[in-house]
Amino acid sequence: MRLTLYTWQYCPFAQRSRIALAVKGVEHDTYELDITRKPYPDWFMELSPNGKVPTLVHDGRPLYESQVISEYIDEVFEGPRLLPEDPYHRAISRLLITYGEDNFIPVLYRLLRSQEESRDEELKEEALEYWRWFNERLREFGSDSGLLFDEPTLADYSFGPFFQRWKLVEYYRYFEVPQTEEYARVRSWREAAEALKVVRDTAPPSEELIKVYADYARDYDNARIPPGRDISSFDTEAWPVEDRPLPPRGLRLDRDD
Ligand SMILES: N[C@@H](CCC(=O)N[C@@H](CS)C(=O)NCC(=O)O)C(=O)O
């Protein structure tokens, strides 16, 4: 059996695949794609036509899209189940994950990339609506443990990396989840998901993430280079993170660091 995960160490979607493989204890090779070197080589585009990590190649057969990869790993390999045994709980897990893909994750990136302070409030309101939605669904369908259900399952593993990434908007856009009852259950979910050892072990340190995603805070995504520079904040090889100062909070394109 040959299994290779194409990943990028800072990518939350690729972190989902690293988590799934770690929970199952599946041996595999890892290929760290340099996402700053574009266009990507033809061999990679043949494996992953959307040009994204994570990409998983199992015995020569490629797969992409993090959620699809996690479910494939769950079905194909032995080890602890990722999706719950109970079909209703499986459906609820997918319900939450789909809502996350459609709403919770896109608004995180939109807020991080926002260049107009006046737009931030609107985006924060929108983001909080999604946090409240999760709070309600967790109360309705979840257990009393911090996690979604009693044991860690795929929804916890899928959201763990994104709960970690919300620190980017807390840092760059002063986003805060209010300490009120409306958010109490989702805050406990975040805390429990982030505390999972496998989520912590697969994540880069928060300070590194903040430095690497500085160009996102300037609205330059996926290694695009802002004007006046010839290197992306994603390029940790040419520009080692330890050599960089921590960028200022509230960073935008028109604000120097
Ligand atoms: N929907 C995809 C998103 C994957 C994704 O956006 N990966 C980013 C890195 S975090 C990527 O490969 N970006 C490279 C690019 O767009 O050039 C998934 O769930 O796997």
Image: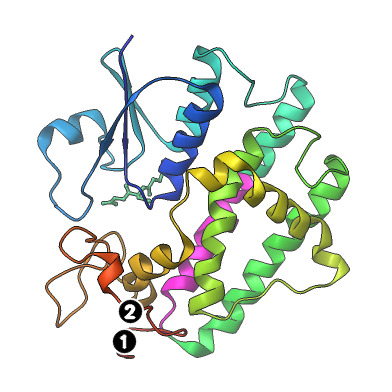
Q: What residue do we see at 78% from left, 21% from top?
A: 86
Q: State which quarter of the image contains the C terminus.
A: bottom left
Q: Are dots 2 and 1 in contact, CB under 8 Å?
A: yes
Residue found at the very far front of the displayed protein = 242
Query: Which percent across, then down, holds residue 32?
Result: 26, 41
**Distance of mark 2 from mark 1, alpha carbons?**
8 Å
Residue 31 picture quarter: top left
Q: Main secondary structure of the magenta part?
A: helix
- Reading the image, the residue beneath label 1 is 257
Mark 2 or mark 1: which comes first in sequence? 2
Secondary structure under the numbered disc 2 in the rendered image: loop
Q: Tell me the amino acid under the disc marked 1.
A: Asp
Up-down: is 226 above or below 65? below
Indicate how the structure is coloured in the image.
rainbow
Up-down: is 41 above or below 87? below
Query: Which percent across, then down, holds residue 189?
Result: 74, 51
Please give the range of residues in magenta: 98-115
**Numbered circle sitting on residue 245:** 2
Q: State which quarter of the image contains the N terminus.
A: top left
Secondary structure under the numbered disc 1 in the rendered image: loop
Left or right: residue 243 versus residue 129 is: left
- Mark 2 neighbour class, 10 Å CA radius: few under 14, some 14 to 19, many 20 or more: few
Left or right: residue 183 versus residue 67 is: right
Q: Tell me the amino acid under the disc marked 2.
A: Pro
Closer to the eye: label 2 or 1: 2
Nearer the observer, 226 or 190: 190
Query: Which percent across, then down, holds residue 110?
Result: 47, 68
Q: What residue do we see at 24% from left, 60% from top?
A: 236
Up-down: is 113 above or below 186? below
Left or right: residue 49 versus residue 43 is: right
Magenta stretch holds residue 20: no
